[in-house]
Image (cartoon, rainbow, N blue to C red):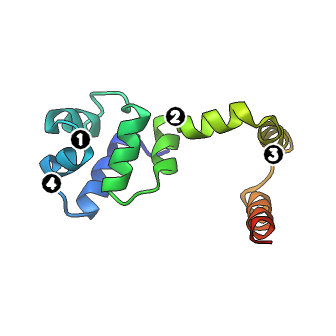
Amino acid sequence: MRKFCDTVRELRQAQNLSLRETASMSGISPAYLSRIERGKEPPPSPAVIKSIAKVLAADPDVLFRLSESTDPEISHYLVNNPCAVRLLRLISDQNFTDQEIGKILNFAEKLKKN
């Protein structure tokens, strides 16, 4: 599995952004971002992960997965919606494949359009 630190560095380089530019736009110090990219720091707080993802035009959920943390908005939603937890538990317990989960997502998107 890819590492958070490597992914952040690769995304930054793909955007042709310097470490200093990225840090400034993310609201963190260049030294801190450098330590993150070198794996000398654990993944940052959820707010910083979201900020970095926005600057790097990346999916924040990918960075959250790599950081082994959860977006607090998702955690809050789950706390307040027990049926969502039951759905996730069912998907987990039944070992749904990505294809099966994709079908659920497609159905859910169609459901909200109607």
> Mark 4 — residue?
18
Q: CA distance from mark 3 to mark 1?
A: 37 Å
99 over 34 or under it: above or below? below
Count of numbered marks: 4
Along the polypeptide, which appears first: circle 1 or circle 4? 4
Q: Crowdedness of circle 4 by 10 Å Cα count: few (<14), some, many (20+)?
A: few
In the image, residue 71 sits, relative to residue 19, either above or below, namely above
- CB-based contact (under 8 Å), mark 3 and mark 4: no
Residues at marks 1 and 2 touching, judged by CB atoms closer than 8 Å: no
Q: Residue at x 62, y 34 (%)?
A: 75
- Mark 4 element type: loop
Residue 51, image x, y percentages? 35, 46
Q: CA distance from mark 3 to mark 4?
A: 41 Å
Determine which of the numbered discs, if any, sits on residue 27 in the image. Answer: 1
Q: Is residue 53 above or below residue 47?
A: below
Residue in view at x 41 percent, y 57 percent: 58
Mark 2 lies on residue = 68
Question: In the depicted view, which residue is nearer to us: 7 or 78?
Answer: 78
Q: Is residue 65 left or right of residue 11?
A: right
Q: Are marks 3 and 1 in contact (CB under 8 Å)?
A: no
Question: Residue 55's x, y, as percent?
Answer: 30, 55
Within 10 Å of disc 1 (Cα), the crowding (few <14, some 14-19, many 20+) is few
Residue named by callout 3: 91
Amino acid type assigned to the residue bearing label 4 in the image: Ser
Q: Secondary structure at mark 2?
A: loop
Few, some or many residues within 10 Å of mark 3 (<14, 14–19, 20+): some
Residue drawn where x is 37% and y is 60% of the image: 57
Sequence order check, earlier mark of 2 and 4: 4
Query: Where residue 80 appears, x then y in whole percent?
Result: 72, 33
